[in-house]
Image: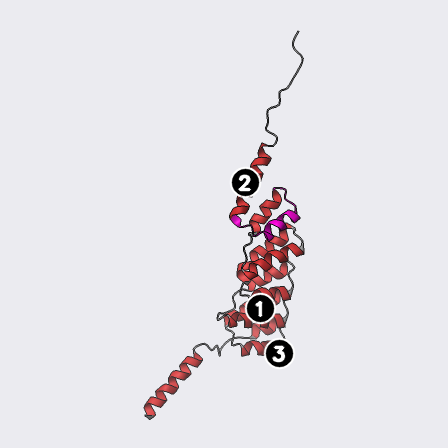
Amino acid sequence: MRYERLLLGVCVLLVVGCNRHPLTDYRPLDQAGMWSSAIEQLKGLNVSDQEVAQVVKLKRAGISDDTCVEIVSSAHEHKRLFTSADSAANLAGAGFTEPQILEFAHADKLDSISLDAVTLKLIGLSNATVQLVLRRHLKGQPVMASAEISELKNTGLTERQIVDRINAGMTDEQAKKEIRERENARNHANTSFVRVRGRKPR
């Protein structure tokens, strides 16, 4: 019986310890300018060396300590390591606020949404339209990818017209079809034959 209890205790220790990172080096966080209180919070989250490197990237992107800790915590709540520093840094560089970045993190969509989000900013759409697109992404509603939105804009649609299509739930395939139609109409607009009249030779 004592042997069985001892074996059970060893098994419990192995299970509890298998996800621990007791040798994680937290010095890079201190060197990156993170406050000791935030580092202690990350220790409580049992971050790995890989995650420490990710948090250093966040710090270099100008993201605050509190947001760094919350982003990592959110990843752990979704049962995974935090590996989305590049996505978060790109969002910050494109002008997205920390509350917006946290909203994407809480939805576990930092990686899936960052490219579209940054592209929408580069297209030159208003903040209201960018938020409309991203809200639909977060809610799982049908919405065009940023590439199709950009192409529609290039065919001459106004932002208001694009917003109408977004609200109607236009899909990528529907957008591609309209893009082709508008491009074909534009290409054939000035190709009708015009007879050039001149003086008859004497």
Circle nearer the viewer, 1 or 3: 3
- The residue range painted magenta reads 155-172
Residue pointed to by mark 3? 37
What residue do we see at 55% from left, 57% from top? 141
Circle nearer the viewer, 1 or 2: 2
> CA separation, marks 1 and 3?
16 Å
Residue pointed to by mark 1? 56
Looking at the image, residue 152 lies above or below residue 21: above
Few, some or many C-alpha atoms within 10 Å of disc 3 (few <14, some 14-19, many ≥20)?
A: few
Q: Nearer the viewer, residue 164 or 197?
A: 164
Tell me the element at label 3.
helix
Residue pointed to by mark 2? 180
Looking at the image, residue 117 lies above or below residue 74: above
What residue do we see at 61% from left, 70% from top? 67
> CA separation, marks 2 and 3?
56 Å
Looking at the image, residue 190 lies above or below residue 42: above
Q: Quadrant of the N terminus?
A: bottom left
Tell me the element at label 1.
helix
Give the percent coordinates (x, y) of residue 54.
54, 67
Residue 161 painted magenta: yes
> Which of the two discs, 1 and 2, labels the residue nearer the N terminus?
1
Name the residue type under label 1. Answer: Val
Few, some or many C-alpha atoms within 10 Å of disc 2 (few <14, some 14-19, many ≥20)?
A: some
Give the percent coordinates (x, y) of residue 120.
61, 53
> Which of the two discs, 1 and 3, labels the residue nearer the N terminus?
3
Tell me the element at label 2.
helix
Q: Quadrant of residue 151?
A: top right
Q: Quadrant of residue 139?
A: bottom right
